[in-house]
Image: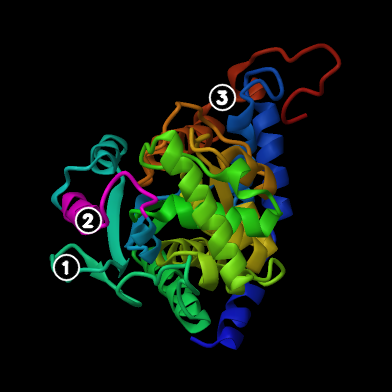
Amino acid sequence: MSEQELGNILAGIGPLDERAAAEAARRLDELTKPPGSLGRLEAVAQQVAGIRGEALPELGRKAVVVMAADHGVCAEGVSAFPAEVTPQMVLNFLGGGAAVNVLSRQTGAEVVCVDIGVNAMLSHPLLRSHKVRWGTANMAEGPAMTREEAVEAIRTGIEIARGLADEGFGLLATGEMGIGNTTASSALLSVLTGEEPAAVTGRGTGIDDARLRHKQEVIRRAIAVNRPDPNDPLDVLAKVGGLEIAGLAGVILGAASRRIPVVIDGFISSAAALIAARLAPLSRDFMIASHLSEERGHARLLQELGLAPMLQLDMRLGEGTGAVLAFPLVEASLKLMREMATFGSAGVSQAAGETPAGA
């Protein structure tokens, strides 16, 4: 895919359907409850109505897309775990044994695992193999990948999201696996917001104070070596990003192009969301923030995106776990709007001064 072809896709992402969102708001106000008393659930229901262009939308099947890739920056010793864990965890996802698998079974969602850049040969009947390259290069020494590879990874995510839409999936979530990817995400956030790396770089896999300081210095060095242009999100992504981050940005953009809501997971997924939003600002309206991660920098990322998390559970696992936990809340918001009685149908009096529903 050329950048021009990518631009054509981005240009096709439209705004929310204001008519459908307004109809949903009216419906919510007619339900047997004080106006606005369901809080964020009402906001989510209106947002999904605007995304789908229907006042009472039904979403159908749910899936979390788990993008997996390796990071050359692991050579700098930025993680408590070795890079070999990435392919090992991919096989764990495929075998159904990871946390995201357990939570997906609990919430009735499917796990779609994608090898977009794992530095190992993987084969499994459930694996979607779309390897752009065998892990990124060490960004502390030069660009993590080429600009063309970044675009190719985004294209992969777009096609996966569109394919899932064609299969009948109406609600997606972003998940990831890649040892070293909090380093890349922190670098992306630092460049795109101008924040000092120390302010947005956390412990990731649980590193100690000394290694945290080293990780922050590696990010400073990567930014100094590569000099990414903060006004060019593709340049930033290619120089200090990751393949799974690019792929997830593509998933968000592909879902938005098909008017499907996307539940965003934690720090890495939100870094991908920021790339998507910088490439196509309207894509932000298709995102639902699931939770506030314990990872330093996640609150800043959500602030930059203008998104408020639905949950705060002190989680920092990734994989899409927080996003999958939020699936039932999204579904609950739509069930309430669809199944609750109105004041008129239930014969319940409204508050004084309000117009009876249906009058």
Q: Is residue 105 left or right of residue 295?
A: left
Instruction: Report if the CB atoms under discs 2 and 3 are less than 8 Å apart.
Output: no
Q: Is residue 93 magenta?
A: yes
User: Which element is circle 2 on?
Assistant: helix
Q: Residue at x 28, y 52 (%)?
A: 111
Instruction: Tell me which label, 1 or 3, sits earlier in the chain.
Output: 1
Q: Residues within 10 Å of mark 1 (few under 14, many from 20)?
A: few
What residue is shown with label 3?
A: 341
Q: Residues within 10 Å of mark 3 (few under 14, many from 20)?
A: some
Whether 39 is drawn above or below 20: the answer is: above
Q: Nearer the viewer, residue 228 or 255?
A: 228
Label at residue 122? 1
Residue 173 in sight: no
What residue is shown with label 2?
A: 90
Total marks placed? 3
Instruction: Tell me which label, 1 or 2, sits earlier in the chain.
Output: 2
Task: Give the magenta part as a residue range.
Answer: 77-94
Q: Is residue 218 left or right of residue 121?
A: right
Cα distance between the residues tagged 1 and 3: 52 Å
The spot of residue 248 in percent (x, y) is 45, 61
Q: Amino acid at mark 1?
A: Leu
Q: Nearer the viewer, residue 126 or 305?
A: 305
Instruction: Tell me which label, 2 or 3, sits earlier in the chain.
Output: 2
Q: Amino acid at mark 3?
A: Ala
Instruction: Report if the CB atoms under discs 1 and 2 are less than 8 Å apart.
Output: yes
The spot of residue 213 in percent (x, y) is 50, 43
Q: Residue at x 16, y 55 (%)?
A: 91
Q: Nearer the viewer, residue 72 or 321?
A: 72
Cα distance between the residues tagged 1 and 2: 9 Å
